[in-house]
Image (cartoon, rainbow, N blue to C red):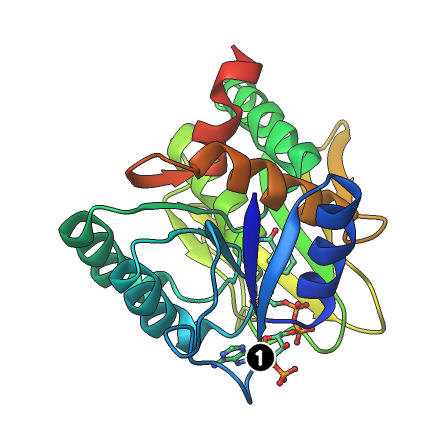
Amino acid sequence: MRIALIGYGRMGKEIERHAVERGMQVTARFDSKNSDVSAGAHEFDVAIHFASPDSVITHVQMCARRKNNMVVGTTGWSKDMGKVWSIVQEQNIGLVHAANFSVGVNIFFRLMKDAAKLFDRFLEYDVFLQETHHKDKSDSPSGTALTLAEILLHNISRKKELLNTPPSGKIRPEQLHISSTRAGTVVGNHSVTFDSVADSIELTHMAKNRSGFALGALLAAEWIDGKKGIFTMEDVLSDIFQ
Ligand SMILES: NC(=O)c1ccc[n+]([C@@H]2O[C@H](COP(=O)([O-])OP(=O)(O)OC[C@H]3O[C@@H](n4cnc5c(N)ncnc54)[C@H](OP(=O)(O)O)[C@@H]3O)[C@@H](O)[C@H]2O)c1
C-alpha cells in the first residue's frame, strides 16, 4: 500500500516509522509549507491526515478530487463534520476519522460504556473526567475526552450537559465536568472517576508514546482501502470486538 502523510510532525513521523516496518510505502509527505496535495505527480492509495484542524476541509476536497481515500486523525474540526460528510458522499470516497486511533483507547471507550451503564443505576455516584496533554496541544478539551464525555452523557441519565471550563461556583448535578491540564511532554492521559461518599473508582488510560495512535491509523488505512463512505475507528474494530 502507498501512503501519503498530510502533516509531517510528531504523528506523521511516527506513522512513517511504523509504515516502513509493516512494508508499506510512504510516497508523499506534506506540511504547512508544502500543503497542496493536488500538485505534482504524487501517487498514493490512502492519505493519512495528522495536521491542523483548519486544513481538514481543504485536504478532504483535494483527496476527493483525486478519488483517494483518507484516514483523518487530526482533532478539533468537529464544526466542519457536516461539510466533510457532504464531500465524502458527493465524491464517493472512503474516510475514517477518530479522535483517538489507539486500539487501547478504543477498548477503554467500550469499558466506559459498560461502566456508565452500571453507574447509571447507582445515584450516589457522581462522575467526572480529567485529561492531561503536552503543552503544545492546540485543542482543549482533547477529542478523546469529548468522546468519553459523549459516552457518559449518553449512558448516565442524570448527566445532561458538559462543563469544560473552570466552574464559577458550585456545579449543577446534571453537569459533567471535564478538566484539562496542559504541561510538559505528556502524550495523553484520560481518567474518569465515579465518586461516592463510600468509595471512588477511577478508570485511567495513559498513552506511553505515540506508537498506539500510529499503529491504529495504519490499521484504519488498510481497512478503508477500496471502501466508500464515512466511518470511525469503532467500525474498523467492530469485527475484532464482536
Ligand atoms: N486521532 C489520534 O489518534 C491522534 C493522536 C495524536 C495526535 N492527534 C492529532 O493530530 C494532529 C497533529 O498532531 P502532531 O502531534 O503530529 O502535531 P505536530 O507535531 O504539531 O505536527 C503537525 C504537522 O502538521 C503540519 N501542518 C500544519 N498545517 C498544515 C497544512 N495546512 N497543511 C499540511 N500540513 C500542515 C505541520 O507542518 P509544519 O511542520 O510545517 O509546521 C506539521 O508537520 C493534532 O490535531 C493532534 O491533536 C490525533
Q: Nearer the viewer, residue 72 or 175?
A: 72
Q: Where does the image place residue 190, in percent across and percent down from the top left?
A: 70, 48
Which residue is at a point 43% across and 43% down the rendered structure image? 150
Q: Where does the image place residue 202, in percent across and percent down from the top left?
A: 75, 35
Split into quadrants, the picture shows ligand 1 in the one at: bottom right
Q: Is residue 193 above or below residue 40?
A: above
Residue beneath label 1, please? Answer: 31
The amino acid marked with disc number 1 is Asp
Q: Residues within 10 Å of mark 1 (few under 14, many from 20)?
A: some
Q: Where does the image place residue 88, in percent across and percent down from the top left?
A: 24, 52
Query: Which quadrant of the rendered structure holds the N terminus?
Result: top right
Q: Quadrant of residue 154?
A: top left
Which residue is at a point 36% across and 44% down the rendered structure image? 160
Which residue is at a point 47% across and 50% down the rendered structure image? 46
Most distant residue in the front direction: 41
Q: Quadrant of residue 31?
A: bottom right
Q: Nearer the viewer, residue 35 or 200?
A: 35
Left or right of 186 in this view: 164: left
Which residue is at a point 49% across and 45% down the rendered structure image? 147
Most distant residue in the bottom direction: 33
